Amino acid sequence: MSACPECGTHVAPTLLQCPGCRRLVHADELKRLAAEAEAAAARDELTVALAAWRQAQPLLPHGSRQAQAVAARVEDLVRRVDAGEGVAPAAPPPEPAGPPRWGWGGVVGGVGGVALLLWKFKALPAFLLTKGKLLLAGLTQWTTLASMLLAFGVYWTVFGWWFAAGLVLSIYVHEMGHVVALRRLGLPASAPMFIPGVGAVIRLRCYPPTPREDARVGLAGPMWGLGAALAALGLFLATGEAAFAAIARVGAWINLFNLMPLWQLDGARGWRALGRAQRWTVTAAFWAAFLLLGDGLLLLLGLAAGVRALGAAPATPDRRAFVEFLLLVAALTALCALPVPLPD
């Protein structure tokens, strides 16, 4: 609640007018945010514009024409950011129309997209160079750095310092994937905070409002985690050091576990955007991976996916989430098959 500067009446943040004197309470703030959003859009900094419009939304009365107009702008910006337009590496903010419906015929096209994404991973060095600044951003927060060092110390006593360092960095990269995805969508997010033995968490003030956006955020963690595992694998191939292969394998296993479509795990968030045909295809991928590898985790994933596939599915499935899901199942399963024992 805020107080009207004219008469002192308490005004809810969702009201534009004071119920006492009818003064426009949030008009100046709305004008400022609109000007900031328009200026950012003109500079092609769409993430900054998106963050400003999202801040303006709670200030507008629900269902009003202004609220509907701002919602339309947000949806358009989300679509453009999702397509890779105008994504500027901006500072963190103060805290969609779906694709056309498609059925089993689109499944074949989605599987073909997996091969394309796998091919794109040959550009991993370029990815690391362009995303390096974003990865380091989390380390500027003392809570992240302090909890990271604490987790490192705990894991060091159990696994040794090489493996502990690799494990902590893998978890950090995974969580920063979520943070970057949230900030791309103009949603506020804290830097990661580590909890030894559990992993790490980030704090949200605003949950992704649509299944499509939630899938982007949820699957970004395993996608970035896959990148970290591939980097560890590359170091193993370059040095022959078994610890790097162990880091790649364990990191892949952790990210594969996160694909379980239950609770608040990343897989459950990606699952929200999948259509019925897509869900059964992902379920079949889990079972195929289990038959190839024989890992009990894959059996559990297949069972959980089969149960969730029976539930209600969205009318407009998201192809990108489907392709990312299949890519993650294939690539992470392959990394989990690395014949490398854990270090002493």
Image: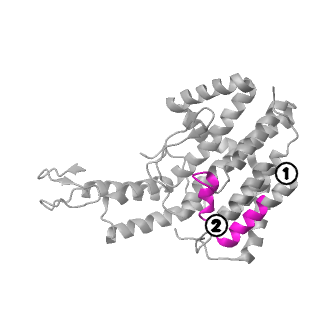
Q: State the SS at label 2.
A: loop
Snapshot quadrant of residue 315: bottom right
Q: What crowding class fits label 1: few (fewer than 14 Cα within 10 Å), some (14-19), or many (20 or more)?
A: few
Identify which residue is drawn at 82% across, 55% down. Answer: 290
**Residue 61 appears left or right of 156:** left
Q: Is residue 328 visible?
A: no
Q: Which residue is mark 1?
A: 294
The location of residue 132, given as percent across then percent down, is 63, 39
Nearer to us in this view, 120 or 281:
281
Seen in the image, is 58 located left or right of residue 288? left
Query: Residue drawn 25% across and 60% down?
Result: 15
Any part of residue 215 in sight = yes
Residue 107 vertical placement versus 256 (above, below): below
Q: Is residue 117 above or below residue 202?
A: below
What residue type is disc 2 on? Leu
Quadrant position of residue 27 = bottom left
- Coloring basis for residues: one colour
Q: Main secondary structure of the magenta part?
A: helix
Q: CA distance from mark 1 to mark 2?
A: 26 Å
Magenta segment boundaries in residue numbering: 262-286
User: Which mark, residue 170?
Assistant: none
Judging by the rendered image, the residue that carries numbered circle 2 is 274
